[in-house]
Image (cartoon, helix red, strand yellow):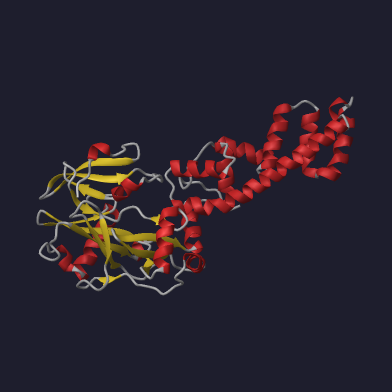
Amino acid sequence: MKVDVGLIDLERFHVNQRSLPGVGDVLLIVPQKGSHRWEEHELHLRSLLCRPDGIVISSGFGKFFNCGENVKSDNIVSLGLAGGRSSIKEKLDGSLIIRSVIDGTVNLRTRGCENIAENMRDAVMRLIGDEHPWLLDPAVEPNEGKSLLMEYIAPENQIVVRYDRPQLIGLGWSVFDGDDLIITPLLSALGTLKPVRSVILPNDIVGLRQVVAGLEGEEGVVVWTQTATGAHLCKFKSLWYMRLHALRSQATPRYMREYCVLNGISTLDELKNALFKEGFDWELVKFAEPIFNEFKAEYDTAMSRLVSLHAAMSACKMHDMPTRKDKALKAQELAGCHGNDMFGYMMAASTGDVKLAAEIADALCVCCSVNELRAIRKRGVEKLGSGSVIDDG
């Protein structure tokens, strides 16, 4: 398999020059952080090592989607489940380890690197040395046209799900000795490497999604569907996992409200685009949807109340009343119908304090006080997960 490096969109993908001992110069091709738009012809570019001329020498999985994220992917899964061509496997919450034999040398790496990421390198190599030393032997599974794909899970590598001991679990193969990247599952043990666990769940996409959504203490499942071009993979995540994964990035209701205020976000599409642009993943964006919808409903309600209040103020010509006392008495009267929280707005608007009236209106729309809104704006635009100390609201 050969990649035309010159055609890769460098605004969405990194093509990094690296050097491997015993191999020489290579190119590491990975998506840029926050890349969420994938064209069909780019799905194989999720994690490739290539020679400088584009010949692939190591590959992870191609890009595969969450259920509900891509219509074409969902259709393949739905037909596969109905036709008995799909298997359902546990989704492990760890780090992908890719083993390839390159020029007679074993290369072990994580998805975004040419070797194993430094923060887990010692632990992974210790586990391999203790339980799977054959993985270091280039004479075992020496085919240079494919990579062995494994998941590393461990208490010290916790993302959300906690595991009781370090393990390497076999997932499958990425095969690139032809024109296309083909993924095949690991169906049985390979030496000491056990395959990922298969599970029995509903074989229709709606039922499966409902059952997986309710799982506790698990990330979810991956549906492997056999097609003419290898296995098609699709992720189904539990709501428990998405909630905790998102909370790790501090996507709390209060913070999401602040984020929308600071960035002038008024639609769900604007929020999605902003979060993707900042590098956040599908799980966080999906988790943010109901939070935003609740926020937007409160915002729309407040706007409707303000419109109704404006009509009442105009009807009684409140702005033309001669004294502040007259305006305050009328504001008290209108507050009985429109809410006591509107009193301050009526006084500011009717006395010509346009700036304060606008601040109060904004605060009402985002369900906070004027002082809270001022504090939010003073903090300025922050990225989610960058050290905010905001508690859940």
- Which residue is drawn at the image coordinates 77% and 31% (left, top)? 348
User: Residue 76: horizontal and vertical position, in percent?
Assistant: 40, 59
**Is residue 148 placed above or below 288 in the rendered structure?**
below
User: Residue 190: horizontal and vertical position, in percent?
Assistant: 21, 71
**Is residue 18 placed above or below 60 in the rendered structure?**
above
User: Residue 342: horizontal and vertical position, in percent?
Assistant: 78, 40
**Is 70 situated left or right of 173 in this image?**
right
**Is residue 357 placed above or below 292 in the rendered structure?**
above
Q: Nearer the viewer, residue 7 or 290?
A: 7
- Count the numbered circles shown: 0
- Which residue is drawn at the image coordinates 47% and 56% (left, top)? 68
Q: Using the rendered view, name the quadrant where residue 334 is placed.
A: top right
The answer to whether any part of residue 141 appears in the image is yes
User: Residue 90: horizontal and vertical position, in percent?
Assistant: 38, 68
**Is 142 situated left or right of 222 in this image?**
left
**Is 151 situated left or right of 319 in this image?**
left
The answer to whether any part of residue 367 appears in the image is no
**Is residue 68 placed above or below 309 in the rendered structure?**
below
- Which residue is drawn at the image coordinates 32% and 59% (left, top)? 95
